[in-house]
């Protein structure tokens, strides 16, 4: 049976629908983060803007409350980047990423983890204090101590203090102890992680899955066997795309409103081939050599320019001349964003 070929526009509309960018939903911050399989949090305001653009009636205090209550944690997960995830997804993703040669899987990290959990048992631990502890008690020095701290704290399930994820974040490195996650079978956890990825970002290729989760192909393929039956498609280059049953595939001509995205939004990073949302001519203007990812806005579903906040105003920099109707819609959405940033 010939597999259906999905055009770039069809893939774009699928991504927008699953990412809540076609039609905002009335969801709690925890609900959004769960649905999107985490939200990038390297820049503290990013998840706030990311939730605002995807929901109705979002208030910053709602996310800050979820962080303070531990319903959302800021942790190192996919691609070794900082994300906001629910504790359940944290446990699932960390189990799925085991056996994948991440730094927290080294023998040294595992050896140091119990001591760091004990160190953090009485309250938050500062990076400087933890490095000093490793130097004094474990014969590590300088950069070796700092590297060991970064790997071992992840192995020990020390996550960033919630105050580092507030809108007005306290940036100093403080880490708190998370309850030891439930032990899960790695390949089963990997299958569930991939299912959640496809629900949020599919249809996608094996290479796309590896790009998002920094997972190795053999581990992905073993997990995919547990997910059958999957839907299978091809893209216009003939690459196989996998998807979960019944996930939305809107028509290519479905209207896509203007949307503003924060720095490092995962919708720009979740595929090896990002052209379904980021046109190739603009890629280097959005994803910089130093790893920075610009704040962007979408017109007709695709990245059309960048934006910045300047003296209380949202200033846009389109990559090409906008139509009169698109320019008006960008202006109206920028005004909404200004009100949110000022609030």
Image (spheres, grey):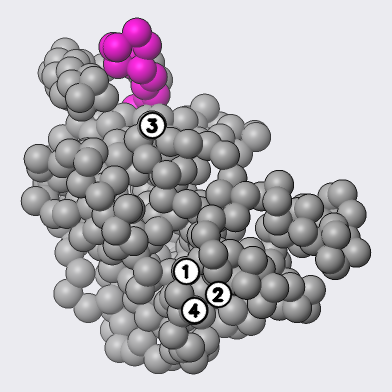
For this view, does 241 lie left or right of residue 199? Answer: right
Q: Is residue 147 left or right of residue 236?
A: right
Distance between the alpha carbons at the discs numbered 4 and 1: 6 Å
Q: Are marks 3 and 1 in contact (CB under 8 Å)?
A: no
- Taking the spot 31% from the left edge, 29% from the top edge, the residue there is 297
CB under 8 Å between discs 2 and 1: no
| Element class at badge 2 | helix
Residue density around tag 4, few if under 14, some if 14–19, many if 20 or more, within 10 Å? few
Can you give x and y, in whole percent of width and height, for residue 267 in the image?
37, 48
Q: Is residue 273 above or below residue 171?
A: below
Q: Position of residue 57 (x, y in %)?
A: 9, 40
The quarter of the rendered structure image containing the N terminus is: bottom left
Foreground: 73 or 328?
73
Q: Which mark is residue 180?
A: 4
Estimate the x, y position of residue 142 in percent, counting from the top left: 87, 49
Please name the residue shown 70% across and 51% down the image: 129
The local crowd at label 1, few if under 14, some if 14 to 19, many if 20 or more residues have their Cα within 10 Å, is some
Gap in Å between the C-alphas at discs 4 and 2? 16 Å
């Amino acid at each position: 049976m010939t597999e259906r070929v999905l055009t770039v526009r069809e893939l774009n509309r699928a991504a927008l629908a699953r990412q809540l960018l076609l039609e905002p939903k009335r969801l709690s911050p925890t609900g959004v983060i769960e649905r999107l399989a985490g939200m990038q949090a390297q820049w503290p305001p990013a998840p706030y803007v990311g939730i605002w653009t995807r929901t109705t009636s979002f208030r910053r205090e709602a996310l800050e409350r979820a962080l303070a209550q531990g319903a959302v944690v800021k942790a190192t997960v996919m691609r070794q980047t900082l994300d906001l995830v629910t504790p359940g997804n944290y446990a699932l993703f960390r189990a799925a990423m085991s056996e994948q040669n991440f730094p927290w899987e080294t023998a040294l990290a595992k050896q140091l983890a119990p001591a760091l959990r004990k160190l953090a048992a009485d309250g938050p631990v500062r990076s400087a204090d933890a490095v000093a502890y490793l130097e004094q008690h474990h014969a590590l020095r300088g950069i070796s101590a700092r590297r060991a701290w970064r790997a071992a704290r992840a192995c020990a399930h020390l996550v960033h203090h919630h105050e580092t994820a507030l809108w007005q974040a306290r940036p100093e490195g403080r880490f708190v102890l998370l309850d030891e996650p439930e032990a899960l079978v790695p390949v089963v956890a990997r299958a569930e992680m991939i299912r959640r990825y496809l629900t949020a970002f599919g249809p996608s290729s094996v290479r796309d899955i590896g790009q998002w989760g920094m997972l190795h192909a053999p581990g992905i393929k073993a997990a995919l066997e547990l997910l059958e039956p999957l839907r299978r498609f091809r893209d216009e280059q003939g690459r196989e795309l996998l998807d979960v049953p019944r996930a939305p595939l809107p028509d290519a001509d479905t209207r896509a409103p203007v949307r503003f995205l924060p720095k490092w939004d995962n919708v720009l990073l979740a595929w090896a081939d990002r052209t379904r949302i980021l046109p190739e001519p603009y890629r280097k203007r959005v994803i910089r050599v130093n790893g920075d990812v610009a704040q962007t806005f979408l017109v007709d579903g695709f990245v059309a320019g960048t934006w910045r906040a300047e003296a209380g105003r949202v200033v846009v920099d389109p990559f090409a001349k906008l139509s009169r109707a698109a320019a008006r819609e960008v202006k109206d959405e920028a005004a909404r964003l200004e009100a949110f940033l000022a609030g």
